[in-house]
């Protein structure tokens, strides 16, 4: 920090000394000294750019570009002094280059710099700013070179226009400072806002002095904002920047309205320049309104896509929460909820439901003889067969626990449920899964059936108990069969299923 400050002091002193020695602020030596001061400011900002995280690097780079535009202004003035500028075109070009620093300043003050903003929005902003640059160039060159250049009113219009732009840019940066929640962003807008505000004040004074002839010391005024920028960019941020924390509502409001400020500034600029350049001003002003509408449309489209992705993720998560991780069918929690809803619907409408409790016969022996990996594969196959054999898509197939499954049949009578049970027994038999420990030599299932009646409680526990008791009877009566709760007739067997 000490070496850059010492070098800066040397350059400032040299600028004053050279201007005094030459007796003119427009002389080449003092202008070269001023150019070196501006180069130090650009170096300081670029140094901060290299030290910053990637997300905040672009704003610092834009600020460096703004300083570079001022350097181009000074370089063009030097060139005009060396070559002679009888027609005033180089002077007009220098003024345009000085005015074009508003482009990076507008960009850094109105952009959100978030990763969620569509790239099309950045392209629209950049295109609009390029149109503004073309308008400013045409406006300034029209006033400062040609027949209007001799009119003092033209100079006053340019000065007033520059003041309005400069102070608006400073105000935008200060507003962004008040809404920045991150300390690094607050430091950037603090530095940029201070530089732009001092630069606006200095430009306001300098331009009015220039209208009556520059004294030898006037060029040192230009050094003031760039000296401030060097100091702010290289020194430690003030403590109050760390302690200041705007509310989320304030931050979001300022960030949301920043693009409106850009469009408003462009429209106001077009109104003020329409007296000289009506058609270009009208075109740029209409583009500002159109681009703002497109910007909103792009952002809304991105937000809709983002919300749709969130909804899909939430739906997948909800599905995963209610699913058995091994088989992919509903789990016990979903079964209890679905059965309760089916019972309530049946009580309310009279369309009663039925429940099937299913157990794989001799599954423990299957696991012991073939291993748990084969057992898991068997459970997955059985779950798939049960799901494919449902009567309707809104019936619920769930894993009850271990090798037990359950199926809730919506709006299904006892007789229809028995038909489904027969179909399921056949479906599992058709899998032809070898089971050495089973008397049949292949995998089979037993089913317990319970049907809702008018007196059935809405609580799922009662119906689950009935179906479980019927399942126990089916296993006791030889397995590979189904039994219905409330029936003691063991005629419902595999033979019935095969004949169906």
Image (cartoon, rainbow, N blue to C red):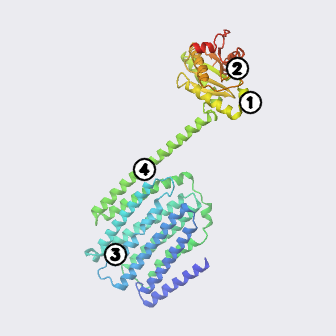
Residue that badge 2 annotates = 439
Label 1 sits on residue: 368
Disc nearest the viewer among 3 and 2: 2
Under circle 2, the secondary element is loop
Please say if 349 is above or below 39. Answer: above
Compared to residue 450, the image places residue 43 above or below, namely below
1 vs 2, front mark: 2
Tell me the CA gap for discs 1 and 3: 93 Å
Marks 1 & 2, CB-CB < 8 Å contact: no
Name the residue at 55% across, 41% down: 313
Kindly identify which residue carries mark 3.
92
Residue 466: name its quadrant.
Answer: top right
Q: Residue at point 64% right, 10% down?
A: 491
Q: Is residue 479 above or below residue 177?
A: above
Mark 2 neighbour class, 10 Å CA radius: few under 14, some 14 to 19, many 20 or more = few
Side (left or right) of 142 relative to 344: left
Q: Nearer the viewer, residue 352 or 487?
A: 487
The picture places residue 286, in percent across and down from the top left corner, at 33, 56
Question: Residue 306 in the image: x percent, y percent?
Answer: 50, 46
Q: Earlier in the sequence, mark 1 or mark 3?
A: 3
Q: Work out whether residue 491 or residue 411 is closer to the camera in this orientation and state it.
A: 491
Tell which tag, 4 or 2, sits nearer the viewer: 2
Decide if residue 274 is on the left or right side of residue 324: left
| Callout 4: SS | helix
State the residue position of label 4.
298
Instruction: Give the mark nearer the N terminus: 1 vs 4.
Output: 4
What secondary structure is marked by label 1? helix
The quadrant the C terminus occupies is top right
Residue 132 place in picture, x, y as percent: 36, 64
Q: Position of residue 107 (x, y in %)?
A: 45, 62
N-term mark: 3 or 2 = 3
């Amino acid at each position: 920090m000490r070496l850059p400050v010492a070098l800066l002091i040397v350059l400032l002193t040299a600028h004053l000394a050279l201007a005094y020695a030459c007796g003119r602020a427009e002389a080449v030596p003092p202008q070269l000294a001023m150019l070196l001061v501006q180069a130090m400011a650009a170096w300081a900002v670029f140094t901060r750019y290299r030290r910053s995280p990637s997300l905040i690097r672009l704003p610092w780079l834009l600020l460096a570009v703004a300083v570079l535009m001022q350097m181009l202004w000074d370089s063009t003035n030097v060139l005009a002094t060396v070559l002679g500028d009888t027609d005033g075109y180089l002077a007009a070009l220098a003024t345009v280059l000085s005015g074009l620093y508003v482009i990076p300043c507008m960009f850094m003050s109105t952009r959100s710099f978030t990763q969620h903003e569509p790239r099309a929005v950045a392209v629209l902003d950049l295109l609009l700013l390029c149109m503004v640059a073309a308008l400013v160039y045409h406006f300034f060159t029209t006033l400062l070179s040609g027949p209007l250049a001799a009119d003092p009113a033209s100079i006053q219009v340019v000065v007033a226009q520059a003041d309005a732009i400069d102070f608006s840019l400073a105000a935008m940066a200060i507003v962004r400072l008040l809404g920045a929640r991150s300390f690094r962003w607050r430091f950037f807008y603090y530095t940029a806002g201070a530089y732009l505000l001092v630069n606006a004040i200095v430009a306001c004074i300098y331009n009015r002095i220039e209208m009556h002839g520059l004294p030898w010391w006037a060029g040192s005024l230009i050094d003031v904002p760039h000296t401030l920028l060097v100091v702010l960019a290289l020194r430690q941020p003030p403590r109050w920047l760390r302690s200041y924390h705007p509310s989320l509502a304030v931050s979001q409001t300022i960030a949301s309205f920043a693009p409106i400020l850009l469009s408003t500034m462009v429209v106001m600029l077009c109104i003020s320049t329409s007296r000289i350049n009506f058609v270009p001003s009208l075109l740029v002003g209409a583009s500002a309104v159109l681009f703002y509408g497109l910007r909103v449309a792009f952002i809304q489209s991105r937000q809709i896509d983002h919300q749709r992705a969130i909804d899909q993720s939430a739906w997948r998560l909800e599905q995963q929460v209610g699913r058995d991780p091994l088989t992919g069918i509903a789990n016990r929690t979903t079964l209890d909820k679905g059965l309760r809803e089916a019972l309530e619907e049946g009580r309310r409408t009279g369309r009663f439901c039925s429940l099937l409790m299913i157990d794989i016969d001799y599954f423990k022996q299957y696991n012991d003889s073939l291993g748990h990996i084969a057992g898991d594969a068997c459970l997955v196959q059985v779950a798939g067969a049960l799901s494919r054999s449902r009567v309707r898509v809104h019936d619920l197939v769930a894993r009850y626990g271990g090798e037990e499954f359950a199926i809730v049949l919506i709006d299904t009578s006892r007789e229809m449920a028995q038909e489904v049970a027969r179909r399921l027994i056949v479906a599992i038999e058709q899998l032809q899964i070898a089971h050495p420990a089973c008397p049949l030599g292949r995998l089979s299932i037993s089913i317990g059936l319970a049907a809702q009646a008018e007196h059935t409680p809405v609580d799922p526990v009662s119906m689950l108990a009935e179906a479980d008791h019927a399942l126990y009877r089916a296993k006791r009566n030889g397995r590979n069969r189904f039994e219905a709760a409330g029936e003691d007739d063991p005629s419902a067997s595999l033979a019935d299923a095969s004949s169906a």
